[in-house]
Amino acid sequence: MKHILLFGPPGAGKGTQAQLLVDKYKFIHLSTGDMLRDEIKRSTEIGLKAKKIIDSGQLVPDEVVAEMVRLRIKNMKDNTGIIFDGFPRTVAQACKLDEIMNDEKQEIAMMIAIDVHDEEIIKRILERGKISQRSDDRDINTIKNRIDTYNQQTAILADYYKQQKKFKSVDGIGSIEDIFQKICKLIEEA
């Protein structure tokens, strides 16, 4: 089993690449964003809290996200691997994920960062917002706040996984297929 973290700023293409990896390698795609959107859609207590936080461009608290992830992993015993998309986002979440994986006698094989500059991210998210109708993808100030939050709180995760010798990166500019081939090469070399 290869458990892989897809890493990068909002709009880097993690969701798109995750789906391609699921199709090719039969991984399970664990997207905390999708999990939270499902909670919001169902208007659960977590969903209502999360919507308010997400709409302001902030991150949902670690303990909420970690518990959702723990429950999903616990129920995913027989698989070829998991693609984590959107988790962990902080060093505290990364430590919690290590704890969860250790409890399940599994480990993260690598973090693959998709590198994209801020101007391209803004352009991509605004375009995505036209299609998705997500309020957090249509407001430039919310998008910039999400990028700032990523740069301040999430980007430091690269160092966490570099210390574990599990960090890899690919250039996120180019065609979806080119980026996918770069990611596949990293996975197959691991």
Image (tube, rainbow, N blue to C red):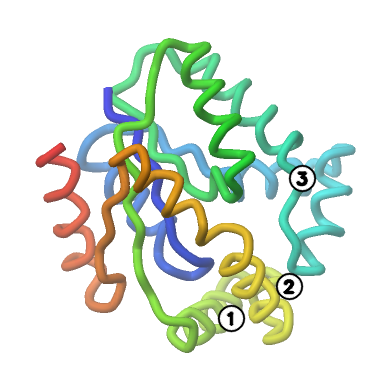
Q: Residue at x 42, y 54 (%)?
A: 158
Tag 1 and tag 3, C-beta contact below 8 Å: no
* Pointer 3 or 2: first along the chain: 3
Res 130 label? 1
Q: Is residue 134 left or right of residue 61?
A: left
Quadrant of residue 183 in the image?
bottom left
Q: Give the farthest residue toward the front.
A: 163
Whole-percent x, y for residue 129 in the image: 60, 76
Distance of mark 3 from mark 2, alpha carbons? Answer: 20 Å
The quadrant of the image that shows the C terminus is: top left
Task: Kindly identify which residue carries mark 2.
Answer: 135
Distance of mark 2 from mark 1, alpha carbons? Answer: 10 Å
Q: Amino acid at mark 2?
A: Ser
Q: Residues within 10 Å of mark 3 (few under 14, many from 20)?
A: few
Tag 3 and tag 2, C-beta contact below 8 Å: no
Q: Residue at x 38, y 59 (%)?
A: 16
Res 61 label? 3
Whole-percent x, y for residue 148 in the image: 64, 74
Q: Amino acid at mark 3?
A: Pro
The quadrant of the image that shows the N terminus is: top left
Q: What kind of element bears circle 1?
A: helix
Q: Amino acid at mark 1?
A: Lys
Asked whether residue 152 is in view, the answer is yes
Q: Residues within 10 Å of mark 1 (few under 14, many from 20)?
A: few
